[in-house]
Amino acid sequence: MGISSIKIPDVGEGVAEVELVEWHVKVGDIVKEDDILAAVMTDKATVEIPCLFDGKILSLGGALGDTLVVGAELLTIEHDGASSGAVEAQVNVVASDAPEEPDEPEAAEEKPASDNAPKPVIQPAPAAKAPEGGNARAPRPEGQPPLAAPSVRARAREAGIDLRQVAGSGPAGRILNNDLDAVFEAGSGPQTSTSRRREGSEEIRIIGLRRKIADRMALANARIPHITVIEEIDVTAVEDLRAVMNAGRGDKSKLTVLPFVSAALCRAIADHPEMNAHFDDEAGIVTRHAPVHIGIATMTDGGLVVPVLRHAESHAPFAAASEIARLAEAARTGKATRDELAGSTITITSLGPLGAVATTPIINHPEVAILGVNKMAMRPMWDGSQFVPRKMMNVSASFDHRVIDGWDAATFVALIKRLLENPAMMFMEDEA
Amino acid sequence: MKRETCKLLILGAGPGGYVCANRAGQLGIDTILVEAQALGGTCLNVGCIPSKALIHAADEFHLVRHLAEGNPLGITAAAPAIDLTQTVAWKDGIVKRLTGGVAGMMKKAKVRVITGQGQIIDGKTVEVETQEGPLRISTESLVIATGSRPQDIGALPFGGDILSSTDVLNMQSVPKRLAVVGGGYIGLEIGTAMAKLGAQVTVIEAAAQILPQYDADLTKPVMARLKTLGVTVLTGAKAAGFGNGSLEIQTKEGPQTIDADKVLVTVGRVPVTDGFGLEGLGLTMQGRFIDIDDRCRSSMHGVFAIGDVTGDPMLAHRAMAQGTLVAEVIAGNAARWDKRAIPAVCFTDPEIVTVGLLPADAPDAGVALFPLAGNGRSLTLERRDGFMRIVYDKGTGLVLGIQAIGAGLSEMAGEFALALEMAATLTDIAETIHAHPTLGEAVQEAAIEGLLAQQ
Ligand SMILES: Cc1cc2nc3c(=O)[nH]c(=O)nc-3n(C[C@H](O)[C@H](O)[C@H](O)COP(=O)(O)OP(=O)(O)OC[C@H]3O[C@@H](n4cnc5c(N)ncnc54)[C@H](O)[C@@H]3O)c2cc1C
């Protein structure tokens, strides 16, 4: 009998630490060699750690969401082998950026070991601290008035919170301001109908891809002073052109608007190279890129993933269309490679038919510009003598105001507008 | 006919009406306050304030008499005399000051005050009979704050020697023999004052005890004091008629007569809901009172009711709280009635304060009591009657009610109410430092008693 400690392996590429996104075993489990023990996430890829022994799990080295350095103990295992000591695990690199499954509370605890997609952990949150003397009693029985100081009651009243539904953690079950804070955090809004009222709350740990997104968004929003320019674009001409180009293609892939937006962006960048750049704010260097690698922000079930249309400037519309379709599919199914998910120089984000009238896109750090495409809609436009129906689409473009002036932002967006409204110009080499 | 419009019209300028008008004005609501008589309503003119003025004068007079009779304090004083006409004039001065204060408050809040009897035409229109002729006012919201008036009894109609509380507060001399019909708080407050002023007072109460809403423990010290003051209390007795200085009463033992120069009838108060067109609105009623919800809304959209017209307890501070509430509601703010307690004070001698549940209301609750005989301050005030009592939940120590009886304890009402509103436990009160030596220490002592009993 030996006891071994399995260490976090070196996953390569200079990665120094990983995030623990999934446990496949728990203490006391009997495992076989090659069973998957855990999944960890590096910068982009999810990595599974298989077992090296037949044996029994003695202890786990961390909780989901923990960041572990390479070489740290992942777990300890009792096995038949003669030797004891530390061993470094091997790794299986699995699908990078595997999207998270939709939230399924029951999936949290017991899931098949073969299912290697990271899942959110949902734990029933303690509704509030247990009151002194263990007299938890919320929601209160009908007719029993909630106990709270007048100031707390006033605060609840103003927020439309029914105190009868709030657990009190104070003496005698008194509802304190803290208890109200917990309700606000849980986001339970005004409650109206008793029969439709829901109780309880759940705590969802932000781990894996969602945490990556959260960190990146926070970073971008905290670091970059955004300026957003919103413009109305008449895409009737683009739509006409698209209809002509798509006609008679039968089963072959068709053009969406995106290849045109991409073409307009590439063409506009030719005049505005400052937009296709990375800003290293610590070094104080803006790096302008010659190739236009467009990140296409894609919604997946697990969150936002940004596959990259490389050398968009060299793609003709149909080539761009099929490459975009392929990337989106890969992102959605979690099959995109690390390379396909890295290296963008500017980003397009679109919520498609949900795209609202205007959005406030968050720049994909360290880029300096992002183009948001809003929903297309038929709207009455005044042509000088009458209203005519036009296909309109707003764009919302955000810029890093530290390195892009408002004037340049506006002219850039105006140029995109001009290109999209006169699509022939996109495909001309002359100055637009 | 002259016409006016406003956003909010309040009918009645008692504590409910004027507080509502003041808050509404502060909130920027275009408000008209209509009052037939003097600003301040029952409370300022013929209720709380004048009665307390009279009680104070009586106490002072009684004190000097007590000192003149010889006392352990070593003070000597000559036998005092009282000129009730002057006392009443002094009281009127206070009332005037306060009603003048209300007028100033209305001005500051930009509330238009219109003097005259209001007549409701419909839920949005009120016609006021002013000195300059009729005025028709259109309003978006209407607040009915018409208060209450003394209840009479068929056998003893007000008039002549049969007085209402309003009449007795304006008497020019102290009656030799006063019969008080009704042993509720108003009858006992005024009856005690009259006894202290030298009247020979008999209280006739139909129920088995005076102050029927309180328990016997609370009323006992009052009974004892009334006895010392020479007041005769007849319980289980009903007044049947009055004539030639003789009040007929029915008792279990049969009919009796009581000699009396004046008869004060204080058998309760009735809400003022008739005589001004209210019936035409067909509001849902709750017995004699206007039925309201927790925002003081009546059954008719845009018509609110506050104060004594909305039921028990008929107290000025309840009316005031409702007045504030309605102004907030009309301003569109989230406000609703969610008070845990309305304190009630009985300015008898000794004074009774009650907040929340009585022991009888909560049979399973714990009851902790501390007698004032054990309170240093009480003894320095030459009093040892009364106690503080806390009704609490045995499991959690939550304070469910506080009662106190003792000289000068009315001032404790605020602390008691605060304890209930804050959902205080025995520990909260016990852990609060009460200044020494004060009567208030007794409530802390009671809380400590309760904690000891819980261990
Ligand atoms: C002797 C006595 C002692 C009291 N002591 C206390 C006490 O110590 N503490 C306490 O809390 N309460 C006490 N009260 C009770 C208190 O006075 C009332 O609860 C309080 O005044 C009610 O206020 P309100 O605004 O509802 O009505 P009110 O004060 O009755 O005011 C109603 C007003 O409406 C006016 N009005 C009515 N109809 C019309 C109309 N159609 N047009 C124009 N105006 C109209 C009336 O003239 C009146 O001024 C006492 C009452 C009495 C009689």
Image (spheres, grey):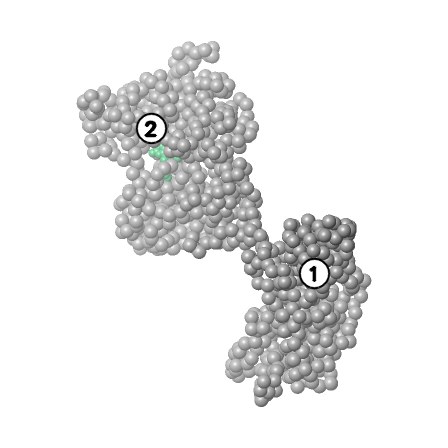
Up-down relation of residue B404 to residue B13 (above or below): above
Q: Specify whether residue B119 is in view.
A: no
**Position of residue A129 measured from the top left corner of the image (x, y, whole percent):** 56, 43
Labels 1 & 2 near each other (Cβ < 8 A):
no
Q: Name the disc covering residue A145, or none.
A: none
Q: Quadrant of ligand 1?
A: top left
For badge 1, the amino acid type reads: Asp
Q: Dividing the image into 4 quarters, which one contains the N terminus of chain B?
A: bottom left
Tell me if A185 is positioned left or right of A337 in this view: left
Tell me if A428 is positioned left or right of B169 in this view: right
Q: Residue tagged by mark 2? A: B211
Along the viewing direction, whichever of B84 and B427 lies nearer the viewer: B427
Q: Cβ(mark 2) to ligand 1 < 8 Å?
A: no
Splitting the image into 4 quarters, where does residue B198 fall? top left
**Position of residue A164 measured from the top left corner of the image (x, y, whole percent):** 46, 46
Q: Residue tagged by mark 1? A: A34
**How busy is the neighbourhood of tag 2: few (under 14 within 10 Å), some, or many (20 plus)?**
many
Splitting the image into 4 quarters, where does residue B386 fall? top left
Up-down relation of residue A378 to residue B178 (above or below): below
Residue sitting at x 50%, y 19%: B376
Residue sitting at x 78%, y 63%: A12
Mark 1–mark 2 distance (CA, rounded to whole Å): 86 Å
Along the viewing direction, whichever of A297 and A43 lies nearer the viewer: A43
Q: Chain of mark 1?
A: A
For badge 2, the amino acid type reads: Leu
User: SS for tag 1?
Assistant: loop
**How busy is the neighbourhood of tag 1: few (under 14 within 10 Å), some, or many (20 plus)?**
few
